[in-house]
Structures are given as structure tokens and as C-alpha cells.
Amino acid sequence: MAYARSLPERAPSNVAGHNPLGGWSVVALLLVLAAQVATGLFVVDVDGLDGGPLSHLVSFEAGRTLAEVHELIFRVLQALIVLHVAAVLFYLLYKRTNLIAPMITGRRSFPEDPGLAGAPVWRLLVCIALAAALAFAVSKAFWT
């Protein structure tokens, strides 16, 4: 809340990474995306002919309910995306801080060295392996 009260200051932002409000925005986006994916696995189409890869594990009624929840979550996701883009534009136009180039390149210049260090490569490899294993397990529905 303290950070939100400081937003009217026009000074450019020199925060390395996301500010507190941006950090919570990322958490919200990731949680909503996870819910979108999770419900999408079980949705059933109106005619019952098409559905998510795990739709056979739920009844038709449950699959339809999840399809409605899936659509609602999509609307929430759209709203969060609009807020995210609005925040980036606010920083560009009002705070005079270009966040678009750093989002694309992953690099941003600062007046002083923020003292950041890169993460070790093994963390990236572990995350890739876990994501691939999860995607494979979901695609093959090992737990059925």
C-alpha cells in the first residue's frame, strides 16, 4: 500500500525487477494462468464430443461447469492483461521509465549498479526438465 501511495511521484523508477505492486501483479497473473490451464484440462464441449485431455475423468455436467469457470477465468485473465499493459503505459508516459525494451531484451540500464547477479544455469535446466515432465504426464494422463 505504501508503494501505491508513492505512485503519483513523477520521478523515473530505478527499481531493479518488479516493484511491490508489479510483483503482486505477476503472482496474480501466474495464479490465474494456472487456474486457466487446470480447468482447461477437464472442460467438456456443449455437444460432449470435444473436451480437454482429461475430460474423460469427469462427468458431462462437471465438465460443462468447468467450461463455464474456464470462460470466467479467461475474462479475469483478460482484465489482468489490460491492467498490466496500462501499468506499462503509465510508467512510459507518466514516470518516463521505458519498461517495454527491458521486457523484450531482458536488459535495463540504471544510473547506479543495482548489484544483481544472474542465476546459475542448473536452475534453468531443472525448471525446463520439470516443465517437460509435467507436460508429458498431463498429455499421457499417467494418474488415471
Image: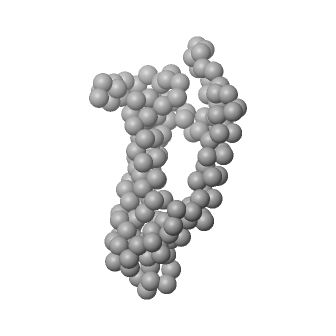
In the image, what residue occupies the spot 40% across and 65% down? Answer: 70
In the image, what residue occupies the spot 53% across and 24% down? Answer: 16
User: Is 113 rendered above or below residue 9?
Assistant: above
Q: On the rendered structure, is 59 left or right of 106?
A: left
**Which quarter of the picture shows residue 74?**
bottom left
Q: Does the image show residue 14?
A: yes
Name the spot of residue 112 as percent of width and height, x first.
58, 13
Colour scheme of the picture:
one colour
Q: Quadrant of the N terminus?
A: top left
Q: Does the image show residue 64?
A: no
Name the spot of residue 72 as percent of width and height, x first.
35, 63
User: Is 81 rendered above or below residue 17?
Assistant: below
Name the spot of residue 26 as percent of width and height, x first.
45, 41
In the image, what residue occupies the spot 70% across and 32% down? Answer: 121
Q: On the rendered structure, is 9 left or right of 95?
A: left
User: Is 144 rendered above or below residue 28?
Assistant: below
Q: How many numbered marks have been drawn onto this rendered protein structure?
A: 0
Of residues 51 and 142, the one nearer the viewer is 142
User: Is 33 rendered above or below residue 10?
Assistant: below
Residue lying furthest top in this view? 112
**Which quarter of the picture shows residue 90?**
top left
In the image, what residue occupies the spot 65% across and 45% down? Answer: 128
Q: On the rendered structure, is 6 left or right of 97?
A: left
Of residues 115 and 46, the one nearer the viewer is 46
Q: On the rendered structure, is 1 left or right of 99?
A: left
